[in-house]
Image (tube, grey):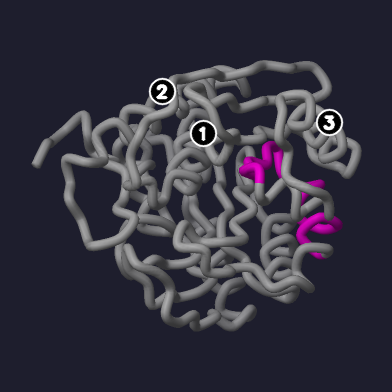
Amino acid sequence: MTAIAVTIAGSDSGGGAGIQADLKSFSANGVYGASVLTALTAQNTLGVTGIQDVPPDFIRAQMDAVFSDLAVNATKIGMLSRPEVIQTVVDGLAAHQTGPVVVDPVMVAASGDPLLADEAVEVLMECLVPVADLITPNLHEAARMLGSGMAETEADMASQAERLLAAGAKAVLVKGGHGTGSESADLLMSEDVTHWFRAPRIETSNTHGTGCTLSSAIATGFAKGLGLVDAVSQAKAYVSAAISSADQLNIGAGHGPVHHFHAFWRS
């Protein structure tokens, strides 16, 4: 049987993040990808110039169409900009077989443009986080979800991961890519697991779509039947290589994308 993953997220017209990054990541990791669009963005490597939300009833129609026909093995959720969109997605998840659910709580684009309304954070925490099998916040997102300052040490990261678990998350991957130092450390924590993933920090400005790509790559691991640690481990290796190869692409004048197909072609 072909492994299938679904991404429920916003579109990036520049192709580096969002739905486009997810589908590239699915394909590069050998999984068939389907999609449910939650928003359209007018976006390039320099920033976001416009957002057009998809009506909630049409989001639900997309979910019903995809999940009623495809034997979905895993689901990745990205940009959900408004409370009513979050609730629509939560209701749709409850109505279908989705496989493990990975939630990347997208709040701000790499350019700094906001992608999540303030009033949506509470709904995200109360309604979506508890139904996810894994959430993957970066340091800024974890802080905003908890209404606290950004973690500055590994002890801070562990404390915030514990608080997110206490808030209802089944598992948390706190990503340390926005930290400092020569090493980038991510913390995976669940009731049964505490595991640090460490890698040398890669010096490049072309990191657009990193979070989307990592969470969707984790979803491909789940879709193939991998457990939590193994799914995150293979995704981390894939994304690290995609970042290392990013400067080969030379896309746009701003923060360029990672190279999703680094194993298949080079520019």
Q: Amino acid at mark 1?
A: Ile
Magenta span includes 106: no
Q: Residue at x 55, y 41 (%)?
A: 178
Q: Residue 3: x, y in percent?
A: 42, 35
Q: Residue at x 83, y 30 (%)?
A: 159
* C-alpha separation, residue under disc 2 versus residue under disc 1: 11 Å
* Mark identifier at residue 237: 2
Residue located farthest toward the right when viewing the structure as drawn: 166
Q: Earlier in the sequence, mark 2 or mark 1?
A: 1
Q: Residue 70: x, y in percent?
A: 47, 51
Task: Determine if residue 101 is in view.
Answer: no
On screen, residue 184 versus residue 128, left or right, reads left
- Mark 3 lies on a secondary structure that is helix
The image quarter containing residue 237 is: top left
Q: Dot 3: few (<14), some (14–19), or many (≥20) neighbours within 10 Å?
A: few
Magenta span includes 135: yes
On screen, residue 48 versus residue 128, left or right, reads left
- Mark 2 lies on a secondary structure that is helix
Q: Which residues lie in the magenta part?
A: 123-139
> Which residue is tagged 1?
218
Q: Dot 1: few (<14), some (14–19), or many (≥20) neighbours within 10 Å?
A: many
Where's the C terminus, which quadrant? top left
Q: Amino acid at mark 2?
A: Ala
> Which residue is tagged 3?
159
Q: Dot 2: few (<14), some (14–19), or many (≥20) neighbours within 10 Å?
A: some
Q: Amino acid at mark 3?
A: Ser
* C-alpha separation, residue under disc 1 versus residue under disc 3: 23 Å
Q: Earlier in the sequence, mark 2 or mark 3?
A: 3
